[in-house]
Image (spheres, helix red, strand yellow):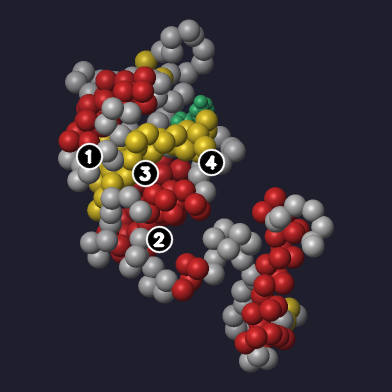
Amino acid sequence: MRIDVVSIFPEYLSALDISLIGRAREDGLLDVRVHDLREHTHDRHRTVDDTPYGGGAGMVMKPEPWAEALDAVADDSPVERPTLLVPTPSGTVFSQPLARELAGYEHLVFACGRYEGIDERVFQWAAERFDVRLVSLGDYVLNGGEVAVLAMVEAVGRLIPGVIGNPESLVEESHEGGLLEYPVYTKPSSWRGHEVPPVLLSGDHGKIAQWRRAQQVERTRLRRPDLLPEGPLA
Ligand code: JE8
């Protein structure tokens, strides 16, 4: 899979050089290219922002550097219409099903805004060359799209075949099964007065699976009741 990221803080994306995603890149499973938006400015000060029409606080990202940067990425795309993902607090909330969908695509492009965001016309224009998706990491305020891109690239990247050593860990996990994860423990079995639940030491794999499922349901009921089916159990 090919991923391009455009940002005024390309060094922010250096986290993609390490760990699981870094390894996937070394292994040739992922081709991640980070671009500096300022390379697509042509004035002395490499200006990417200007004052908002209509007034108001802060600055808005100018359309011209974005169009030039995105044109360059689209010209170099392995596909006819790559997917352009724009992190924004006014987008649809990113989710595991969306990560799954994106993991099936050949080319993703992320546009990281800063300041008060990117001139809205960029998204209208970009629809000529991209499938444009405005996505939010969640209902809280960040200073720009970079942190959201780190999260989304990690969520998508780990779903690409070969990126995770043990793909079994992909099926069991939270948000694919619709329940939260069960609690996990390791040695020592007794630690600072806290014991590992004895069932996990019993060697009875049927009972362990049953216990873990019950833990998942109980945690979900307590912490994320919104994930459970409505009403009293049939
Ligand atoms: C961003 C963001 C995601 C999330 C994403 C991109 C670009 C209009 N507001 C802009 C005003 C306050 C500051 C904002 C800064 N900003 C935030 C996000 C996001 N994805 N879940 N929260 N925030 C930009 C500029």
Amino acid type indicated by mark 4 = Val
Q: Kindly state the secondary structure of the residue where label 4 is placed.
A: strand
Residue 73, percent from left and from top: 22, 37
- Residue on which the image places disc 1: 80
Report the mark closest to the observer, 2 or 1.
Answer: 1
- Residue on which the image places disc 4: 93
Classify residue 70 as left or right of residue 205: left
Q: CA distance from mark 4 to mark 2?
A: 19 Å
Does residue 154 sit above or below 19 in this rendering?
Answer: above
- Residue on which the image places disc 2: 158
Amino acid type indicated by mark 2 = Arg
Amino acid type indicated by mark 3 = Tyr
Classify residue 119 as left or right of residue 208: left
Q: CA distance from mark 4 to mark 3?
A: 22 Å
Does residue 88 sit above or below 121 in this rendering?
Answer: below
* Mark closer to the chain start, 4 or 2: 4
